[in-house]
Image: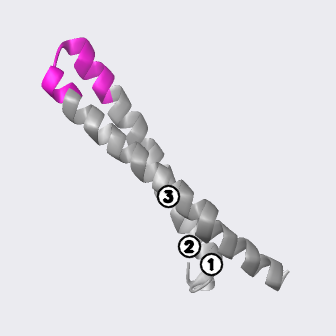
Amino acid sequence: MKDFKGMPVLNAGLLAAAQAVEHYEISRYGTLSTWAEELGYAEAVDLLEATLQEEKNTDKTLTGIAKSVVNVEAEQDEAEDG
């Protein structure tokens, strides 16, 4: 990270890592919600589904930031350096 400090490519990499975490969380909450439903824990299903939706919304937001700003800046920086 030191080598890329202040460079747009670092932001792109950090955002990609954040999205990887979101994808992991989406898979976990989806699984837990399914298990809770199968076990008849309706209240837990509601909470897990709400959290799952929050994680999906966060992922969607990160995708928007990546496409509209972060990846664009990293690509422009690379084109200037290339």
Number of residue marks:
3
Position of the N terminus, as image quadrant, is: bottom right
Q: Position of residue 17 (x, y in %)?
A: 51, 59
Question: What's the amino acid at mark 1?
Answer: Pro
Q: Position of residue 42 (x, y in %)?
A: 16, 20
Q: Residues within 10 Å of mark 2 (few under 14, many from 20)?
A: some
Give the residue displayed 41% in from the left and 48% down from the top. Answer: 57
Q: CA distance from mark 2 to mark 1?
A: 5 Å
Question: What's the amino acid at mark 2?
Answer: Asn
Identify the disc placed on residue 19. Answer: none
The residue under label 3 is: 62
Q: Nearer the viewer, residue 2 or 77?
A: 77
Callout 3: SS = helix
Coloration mode: one colour
Q: Residues within 10 Å of mark 1 (few under 14, many from 20)?
A: some
For marks 2 and 3, give the one nearer the viewer.
Answer: 3
The residue under label 1 is: 8
